Image (cartoon, rainbow, N blue to C red):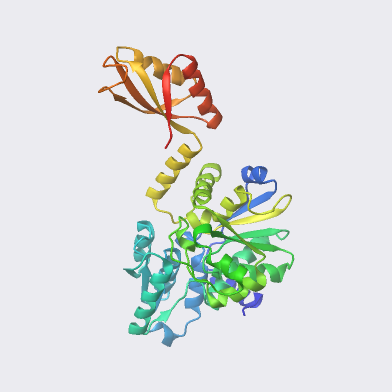
Amino acid sequence: MITIGDIKAAQESLKDVVRKTPLFYSTTFSKECGCEIYLKCENKQKTGAFKLRGAYNKICSLSEEERRNGVVASSAGNHAQGVAYAATAFGIKSTIVMPTTAPLAKVQATKNYGAEVIQYGEVYDECYSKAVEVQKETGAIFVHPFNDDKVIAGQGTISLEILEELPDTDIIVVPIGGGGLISGMAVAAKAINPNIKVIGVQAEIIASSKISLIKNEIVTLPGVKSLADGISVKTPGDNTFKYMRKYVDEIVTVTEDEIAYGIFSLMERNKLVAEGAGAVCIAALLAGKIEVEGKKVVALVSGGNIDIAMVSKIIDRELVMLKRRISISVELQDKVGQLSSIITDIVALGGNVYKARQDRNWSSKGLEYTNVIFEIETQSKDHAKHIISNLEDKGYNLQVIEK
């Protein structure tokens, strides 16, 4: 098993390649969670995620003979970009197998870094099978995204950076898919301070590492695609399982709703764009899944490679879930001035009319009435209630439309 010496050697190999990413204190999240929360922003890393660390350290370790036939990898996106970047830096051909469901931004970025991309399957494990076929056909070196000691050592350099800057850290919270990231980070953290807790976070719908640790054996789950696609792994690695069993203190899970809220909260409160896997740590903290009161906690934002269309969907959805965008249907007399009057009333109550759609075809009261559907932006759930109750007090016949 690797030691902190291996991780420090990886840090030396990476010193002119990777960025030392920001670690900053979040006042907002700290107040909400009752502790000191710091965000380690690997979404600001080159290629947009931590994966460059492990991929580069692995490729750096290859001999000239091993590099001759190139490298092959399977990835949902971030490891793909890390391998492509590193391979191109060494002048090596890279072939990456990515799922058909991978965000377009990740696929295009991988190609832009110089890789040949093959899209196959829906989850990582299906990509892995295809990549093994390619490896056998070409003789290329397979760069595993997590079940490789050189990769694990590269990922562990994140803990070195954290503890150089914040040596009195009590808890480090880390996303888990196959386990490579948390394995390396846990080895480094525990070597520096054995009292540090290392806690993993996994998507509830595909919590293979958590279940494996509970059963004390490697478990394979059905392939399911989480919003946290970067950690949607059916089977943890046999190598990483040994590290997790020895060094990881706890694994908690988060729901898809909690992940979406984590992405939204990082954007709104800290102006950080995170992908699903990058948001699971703050999602777990906001959901109260980890005991952190009074502690100094570092939450890893592991990556920011999210499709912009998905960002738009999440923002719209969360605004509706938080009642900061509400829809109401109001019955009005179909005559001049009625529409402008209610809009004036809504604005006077602090609401912003986002959309208005009039259905003039039919009302139960007759043709002289019409139903108008309003989408209204509000400041909070309480503000939404205030608007609705005041409109009803003014005599408007309305219904709230639940989405």
Asked if 44 appears above or below 374 in the picture, the reply is: below
Q: Quadrant of the C terminus?
A: top left
Where the N terminus falls, by quadrant? bottom right
Quadrant of the rendered structure where residue 121 is? bottom left
Left or right for 337, reference 280: left
Q: Residue at x 62, y 51 (%)?
A: 285
Farthest residue toward the top? 336
User: Which percent across, then down, holds residue 311?
Assistant: 42, 47
What is the count of numbered marks? 0
Residue 319 appears in the figure = yes
Q: Is residue 303 visible?
A: no
- Give how far across and how far down residue 294 sits, in percent: 74, 50
Q: Is residue 363 left or right of residue 280?
A: left
- Residue in the image at 58% along x and 55% along y: 281
Within the image, what quadrant is residue 401 found in?
top left
* Place of residue 195 in the rendered image (x, y in percent of width and height, measured from the top left): 74, 65
Q: Position of residue 15 (x, y in %)?
A: 56, 69
